[in-house]
Image (tube, rainbow, N blue to C red):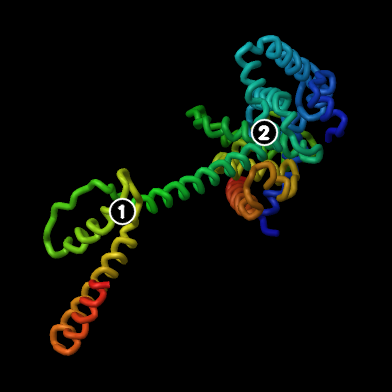
């Protein structure tokens, strides 16, 4: 132990031996009790109401339960919001068509859609139906394929005179029947 | 320090048992407060405020065994607030007189106890360069003879921090003592 440590220990021993003493301990206690009793009589109505309404926050298990419930409500809210957003996105993907709506564009791109309108328009009742864009595209593709096949058949018939004669004969026969 | 029955009665608002609690614990609280603040009046005020706080919040206390820690924690926190507010007043320099007092006590009158005022003066001098936390750790460890675990529970510092602060405090005081004595 070096000199500094030795002196430190000596100083410490002096201080440890001389523990501070509280003078007039009884009078000191009396003073505290008196202060508390005076304070008790001064508690206002407002403090009582606040204590009554919010005193429960000091109870450990009540506080923990409220925190757990609050977290559950927040999670539930978040889940509901996600669900609602998903439904809104699904709705915005859908197309709403009205049987009375008139298409005015006559470009080649829309000729198929006009054809579809003519086909579906006869069967649609007044009011609105929900058809998705996907279904419309599929229908248009199907109509286009049929049209191509129909043109192929017409081309074959035109270029084969014997076949043409045969088909004309059959058609005349079915008309007579 | 305090039995379970007394604490339960205090929780139920029994003023008689609370007086008993105050009488038992005030001396310990006063010792820590005086050693930290170095002023008897301030120390008495701190102990008084601490006892009022205890009365108002004793129903929140969890277990009987931690009452001592809880009491000291309240006292130390109130002392911290006081120490932070305090600015060193430009009084006449009493350091030289205090060193003479220390030397006298060590070499001439080693068996005579110091008065409250003298003890406070010496502690103030030795710890004037320390932060409130370092001072608290020094007082609780070397003067009140508490363990590092207890000090950690009272001050809220980790045990590593307690050790580090204590080491620093001891080193600074050692240097001062070696230089002056």
Instruction: Examine the image and state in which quarter residue B113 appears.
Output: top right
B130 or A39, nearer to the observer: A39
The quarter of the image holding the C terminus of chain A is bottom left
Residue A66 falls left or right of residue A15? left
**A75 or A36, which is in the foreground?**
A75
Q: Is residue A76 left or right of residue A128?
A: right
Residue closest to the far front: A176
Percent position of residue B52, x then y: 70, 23
Residue B131 locus on image (x, y percent): 55, 42
- Mark 1 against mark 2, which lies toward the viewer? 1
Please state which of residues B40 and A117 is positioned toward the viewer in this rendering.
Answer: A117
Q: Name above or below for residue B160 compared with residue B103.
A: below
In terms of image quadrants, where is residue A132? Answer: bottom left
Q: Choose top left, top right, bottom left or bottom right for residue A57.
A: top right
Q: Which residue is mark 2?
A: B74
Q: Residue at x 66, y 40 (%)?
A: A64
Q: Position of residue B109 (x, y in %)?
A: 76, 37
Tell me if I can see residue B35 in this picture. Answer: no
Q: Please report, as a chain letter, where disc 1 is located.
A: A
Mark 1 sits on what residue?
Answer: A123
Q: Chain of mark 2?
A: B
- Would you say the residues marked 1 and 2 are in contact, meaning their CB atoms lie under 8 Å apart? no
Same chain under badges 1 and 2? The reply is: no
- Nearest the eye: A77 or B97: A77
Location of the N terminus of chain A by quadrant is bottom right
Check disc 2: other Cα within 10 Å, few if <14, some if 14-19, many if 20+: many
| B57 w.r.t. B162: above or below | above
Q: Residue at x 62, y 32 (%)?
A: B79
Locate residue A19, reporting x and y percent. Answer: 76, 35
| CA distance separating discs 1 and 2 | 85 Å
């Amino acid at each position: 132990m070096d000199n500094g440590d030795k002196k430190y220990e000596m100083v410490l021993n002096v201080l440890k031996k001389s523990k501070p003493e509280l003078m007039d301990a009884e009078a000191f206690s009396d003073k505290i009790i008196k202060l508390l009793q005076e304070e008790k009589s001064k508690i206002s109505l407002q403090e009582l109401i606040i204590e009554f309404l919010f005193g429960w926050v000091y109870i450990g298990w009540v506080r923990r339960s409220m925190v757990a419930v609050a977290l559950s409500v927040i999670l539930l809210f978040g889940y509901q919001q996600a669900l609602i957003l998903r439904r809104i996105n699904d709705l915005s993907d859908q197309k709403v068509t009205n049987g009375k709506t008139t298409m005015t564009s006559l470009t080649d791109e829309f000729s198929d859609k006009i054809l579809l309108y003519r086909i579906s328009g006869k069967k649609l009742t007044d009011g609105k139906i929900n058809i998705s864009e996907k279904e419309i595209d599929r229908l248009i593709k199907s109509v286009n394929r049929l049209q191509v096949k129909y043109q192929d058949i017409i081309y074959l018939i035109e270029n084969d005179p014997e076949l043409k004669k045969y088909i004309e004969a059959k058609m005349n026969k079915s008309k007579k029947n | 320090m305090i039995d379970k029955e007394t604490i339960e009665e205090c929780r139920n608002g029994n003023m008689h048992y609370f007086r008993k609690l105050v009488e038992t614990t005030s001396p310990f609280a006063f010792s820590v407060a005086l050693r930290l603040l170095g002023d008897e009046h301030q120390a008495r005020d701190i102990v008084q405020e601490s006892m009022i706080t205890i009365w108002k919040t004793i129903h929140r206390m969890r277990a009987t065994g931690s009452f001592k820690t809880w009491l000291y924690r309240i006292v130390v926190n109130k002392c911290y607030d006081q120490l932070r507010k305090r600015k060193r007043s430009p009084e006449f320099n009493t350091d030289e007189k205090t060193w003479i007092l220390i030397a006298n006590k060590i070499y001439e009158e080693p068996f005579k106890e110091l008065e409250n005022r003298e003890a406070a003066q010496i502690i103030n001098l030795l710890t004037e360069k320390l932060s409130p936390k370092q001072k608290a750790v020094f007082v609780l460890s070397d003067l009140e003879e508490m363990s590092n675990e207890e000090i950690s529970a009272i001050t809220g510092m980790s045990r590593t921090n307690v050790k580090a602060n204590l080491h620093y405090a001891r080193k600074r005081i050692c240097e001062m003592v070696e230089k002056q004595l």
